[in-house]
Image (spheres, rainbow, N blue to C red):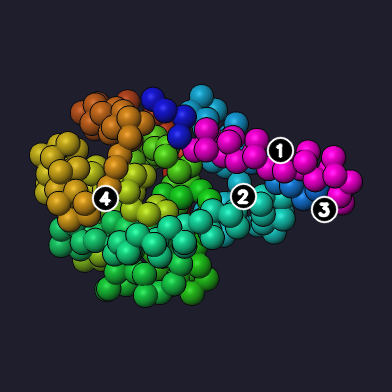
Amino acid sequence: MGVGISFLIGLKAATLFSIFTFMNNLGFKWFAIPFLYASLISFLVSIASHPSINLPMLLGKGSDGVFPIWSLIIFSPYLYFVRAFSALRRLRSGEAPYSEICEGVYVGGWPFSPDKLPPGNPAVIDCTCELPRKTELSGHAYLCIPTWDTRSPQPAEIESAVKWACRKRAQNSPIFIHCAYGHGRSVAVTCALLVALGVAEDWKNAEKLIKERRPYIRMNALHRKALEEWSKFRLSSPKRNDEIGLGSVILSSPSERS
C-alpha cells in the first residue's frame, strides 16, 4: 500500500524547507521564516496522515464540519493550500461536481457553494478532514466522517454512515456523499451504501456501477481493504457490532441520530 498523502505532503515539507534554507543563506531571514513554519506544519501533517498513525482529528474539524479558530491559525499553511489546490484541480478537470449513481444517491466532490449540491435538499455525508462545511449549506442534515485524503474510513465508520444514510432514504431524503473530488473516500462509503440498499450484490459490483456513472473514480488498496473488512463486519453478530464501537463516527447533532 502506498503512503499517498504522507509522501506528497512530506515532499512539500522538504521543498518548503529548502526554500527557507536558500533564502536564509541569502540573508532574507525574516522573509524565510514563513517557509520554515509552513514546512514544519506540512511535516506534521505527513506524519499524522501516515497509515500507521492515521490521526485526522489533528486538524480539529468539528462534528458540524467547522474548523475552530485555533486550527485555522495553526494549520493555515495546509488548510488553505488544500482548498486552493482542490478548487484549481476541479476547475481544470471539468468533471461534474456530482453524479447520481441510483435514484436518490449521489457521490461527488466538495460542495464549496450551493450550486455544487444535488437537488432535493440532500442529506450530506462528508468524508473529508481537511475541507470545511460552508455556512450557507448548514440547513442540510449532515454527518461527518473525517478521513485523510487517499485514506479510507474505518469499517465501523462506514457501517455507521450506511445506517445513517438508510434512515434518511427511508424518509425519502436524497443522499450526497462527498470527499474532495468524489473519487476515493466518498466512493468507498457509496459502495457500501449501494450494497445495503440492495442496488449491488457486493462492493465490487457497486464499484463497477459507480464507475459507469463517474468514470474517474479510483479507489486504492486502503479503500478496498476497508470494504472487505466491512463486508465481513456486516455478517458478524450484533454483539460483535457493539464491540467494534459504532459510536466512533461523529454525528452533527443528537437529533440526527434518529
From the image, tell me which residue sits under label 1: 18
Of pointers 4 and 1, the one earlier in the residue sequence: 1
Label 3: which secondary element: helix
Q: Do the residues labelled 3 and 4 touch (CB within 8 Å)?
A: no
CA separation in Å, label 3 and label 2 = 19 Å
**As drawn, is 45 to the left or to the right of 144?**
right
Q: Which amino acid does label 1 sit on?
A: Ser
Q: Residue at x 36, y 70 (%)?
A: 116
CA separation in Å, label 4 and label 1 = 34 Å
Q: Foreground residue, 25 or 247?
A: 25
Residue 158 placed where, x, y %? 34, 41
Label 1: which secondary element: helix
- Which quarter shows the C terminus? bottom left
From the image, tell me which residue sits under label 2: 78
The range drawn in magenta is 5-30
From the image, tell me which residue sits under label 4: 216
Q: How crowded is the residue under tag 3: few (<14 C-alpha within 10 Å), some, or many (20+)?
A: few
From the image, tell me which residue sits under label 3: 31
